[in-house]
Image (spheres, grey):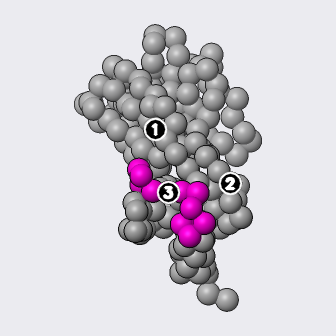
Amino acid sequence: MSFLRRRPKLPAALKPALEPEERVLTWAPVDGDKALVATNLGLWLPGGKRLGWHEIHKAAWSGRELRIIPSEVAEERDEYAVLVDAPVIGFLLLEPGELPDQVRTRVTKSVAYTSHHPLNAGGVRVVGRRAPGKNGLTWSVRYDSGTPVKLPAVVELTGELVSAAQGATAPPE
């Protein structure tokens, strides 16, 4: 019966250097002798870099290829970060197992708040995400293409939108 078959355990040679509270959820082989490893804290890429779930902007599964779009900080502001997309990272997964599902679930669960606001020119998305080891939400914004992100009025309005979102999600006192 196939539902009783368990995925083989992650070989020790492929296991990344996990933090004490980190545990492996699932994994998938890539390039024969490497692996993508999903943990409760993020996705370990071949080569030993971990992307926290809150650092992944998008993930798409084609049925054979997992494409990850990480976030990159373009600018740090007082209460939030301005994020842009880093280059897409793609992995051919011939034996994906539960990995694509776990990636989708974990990235989605990291988003606690999101709202898009049209501006006179362009728009901005305000996002509050859960990040491991941080109390409360981590706040960021993503501007639509063509938005004048450095214009003082846009920066001021963005700050107001982030403050309103923080107020709306703050636990009652």
Of pointers 1 and 3, the one earlier in the residue sequence? 1
> In the image, residue 154 lies at what x, y percent?
54, 66
Q: Nearer the viewer, residue 138 or 105?
A: 138
Q: How many neighbours does mark 2 have within 10 angstroms: few (below 14), some (14-19), or many (20 or more)? A: few
Is 70 located above or below residue 138 in the figure?
A: above
Residue marked by disc 1: 69
Mark-to-mark CA distance, 2 and 3? 16 Å
> In the image, residue 170 lies at what x, y percent?
60, 79
Q: Would residue 103 be found to the left or right of residue 38 on screen?
A: left
Mark-to-mark CA distance, 1 and 3? 23 Å
Q: Residue furthest top?
A: 32
Q: Would residue 131 be found to the left or right of residue 32 on screen?
A: right
Q: Is 149 colored magenta in this rendering?
A: yes
Q: How many neighbours does mark 1 have within 10 angstroms: few (below 14), some (14-19), or many (20 or more)? A: some
Q: Residue furthest right?
A: 20
Position of the C terminus, as image quadrant, is bottom right
The magenta segment:
144-155
Position of the N terminus, as image quadrant, is top left
Of the residues tagged 2 and 3, which is closer to the observer?
A: 3
